[in-house]
Amino acid sequence: MEFLIFCIFGGLSVVFAVMMIMSKKPVTCALSLVMVMFCLAVLFAVQNAHLIAILQVLVYAGAIMVLFMFVIMLLNLREKEGSASHPKGVAQMFGGAAALSSLAAVVTMTRGPGIPAQLVSDHFGSTAEVGRILFTSYLLPFEIASVLLLAALVGAVALVKIRMR
Amino acid sequence: MIMMNNYLLLSAALFVIGAVGVLIRRNLIVVMMCIELMLNAANLNFITFANYHHKMSGHVFVFMVIAVAAAEAAVGLAVALALFRNRETVDVDEVDSMKG
C-alpha cells in the first residue's frame, strides 16, 4: 500500500518537476511547482510527518507560491526565452545526468536502517510532539527563526518601497 | 515494507532537476522556484531519515527550512521587483554588471 502511494506520487512529483523546468510560461512553472509540493505533502503524511504535511500545503503551496504568483502577475513578463533550447542547455543536462547518477550510486550503495516508525510510537510526528520538541530542545533556533522572519519582512518592504537611483 | 533508499533516490532526482533548472532557465523568478524545489527535496530527505531513525529532530529542521524558505522568497521577490523597476528585465543573463 505504501509502495503504491510512493510510486504514484513520487512519479507524479518527478513529472511535474520536469514540466516546471521545461515550461515556457512562468505561471505554468508555478502551478507545476504547487503540484510537486502537494505530492511531497502526501509523501510526508505517509511517513508519519502529519504536521509537516499540513505545513507544506499551508505555507509552501499556499503562502509562498501565492507570493510567486503575485509577482509573476505584477511583472507581466513577455516570455521571449527559448528555455530548454538554450545553447548551453545540453551541456547542463549532461551535467545534471552525471550528478544524478553519482547521487543514485551513493544512495544504492548505502544500506538503509531498519523499520519505519509506525511500528514503534503512536503519536510520532503529531502536532503536540513536534511542538514539545520545538519549545524545549530547539527553543533558540525557533526564536532565531522568528527574528529572521521579522528581518526578512522589513527588508522586503524596504527593498520594494525605497526608490533606488 | 518500502525501503528508505527509494525515498532518497526520489529526493536526489528532484534535487538534480532543480539544479538543472537553475542552470538552464534565465527567468529570475523561475530560477527561484527551482531553488524552492531543491529545498523541498532536502525536506523529503529530512522527513525520511526522521521516520526511519525514529527521531523527531528532522521534523523541527523541516520547520526551520520552511521558515527560511519563506524569508528567502520574500526578499528574493523584492529584489526581483526592484531589478525589474530599474532594468526592465528579470533575465539573469542581462544582469551582468558585477561580472568580472
Image (cartoon, coloured by chain):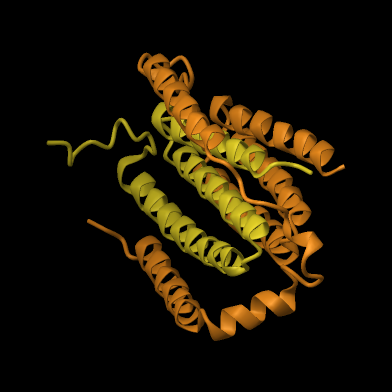
Chain colours: A orange, B yellow
Q: Residue at x 50, y 83 (%)?
A: A139
Specify the farthest residue to the left. B100
Specify the quadrant of the image occupied by residue A129. bottom right
**Quarter of the image containing the N terminus of chain B?**
top right
Q: Nearer the viewer, residue A131 or B35?
A: A131
Image x and y of residue A39, in percent: 73, 44
Q: Nearer the viewer, residue B10 or B50?
A: B50
Specify the quadrant of the image occupied by residue A148. bottom left
Q: Nearer the viewer, residue A126 or B50?
A: B50
**Position of A33 relative to A90 (above/below):** below
Does any portion of residue A78 appear in the rendered image? Answer: no
Q: Residue at x 52, y 30 (%)?
A: A104
Image x and y of residue B60, in percent: 57, 69
Does any portion of residue A146 appear in the rendered image? Answer: yes
Q: Residue at x 58, y 84 (%)?
A: A135
**Position of A131 relative to B64 (above/below):** below
**Quarter of the image containing the C terminus of chain B?**
top left
Image x and y of residue A149, in percent: 47, 72
Image x and y of residue A46, in percent: 78, 52
Specify the farthest residue to the bottom. A136
Total labels drawn: 0
Is residue B100 rendered to the left or right of residue A32? left
Specify the farthest residue to the right. A1
Q: Residue at x 65, y 32 (%)?
A: A14
